Image (cartoon, grey):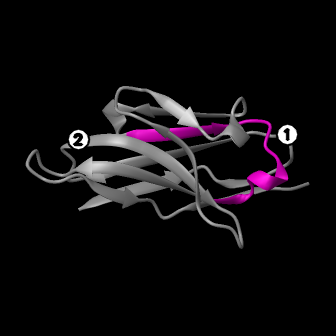
Amino acid sequence: QVQLVESGGGLVQPGGSLGLSCAASGSIFSIDAMAWYRQAPGKERELVGAVTSGGVTDVRDSVKGRFTISRDNAKNTVYLQMNSLKPEDTAVYSCNAQIKERFYSPTREWWGQGTQVTVSS
């Protein structure tokens, strides 16, 4: 079994910063792309950013210049550094990883449990 465990959410004032991390553990042969998604109340889940195993990254336009996604392959961990936070960034943030459990296994998608980020004064 594979587990994705997130940490780092919380309450922050507008203009502040928060860092999220998500560590994958368990039966892992390899991890392809890792990503962060978010879902605000009453809205659909949206992709925030993604990073390949080779370190290629991309983030959605609304967070460009404010959010940075990165990963540490040795630790099977993906990070999301969020700066200049706005109230509209308030959401549950969830990590996602494309994981092969064995060299012969198909790649499967795994999700973390989600962590709340609230931006409010």
The quadrant of the picture occupied by the N terminus is bottom left
Q: Which mark is residue 38?
A: none
Relative to 10, is 73 on the left or the right?
Answer: left
> Does residue 85 belong to the magenta stretch?
yes
Q: Of 70 and 54, which appears nearest the observer?
A: 54
Q: Return the residue at label 1.
A: 15
Q: Residue at x 31, y 40 (%)?
A: 32
| 9 w.r.t. 114: above or below | above
* Part of the protein shown in magenta: 77-92
Q: Residue at x 10, y 44 (%)?
A: 103
Q: Return the residue at label 2.
A: 30
| 119 w.r.t. 43: above or below | above
Q: Of 60 and 88, which appears nearest the observer?
A: 60
Residue 121 x, y percent position in the rendering: 91, 54
| Tag 1–tag 2 contact (CB < 8 Å) | no
Relative to 32, is 114 on the left or the right?
Answer: right
- Residue 84 appears in which quarter of the rendering? top right
> Does residue 107 belong to the magenta stretch?
no
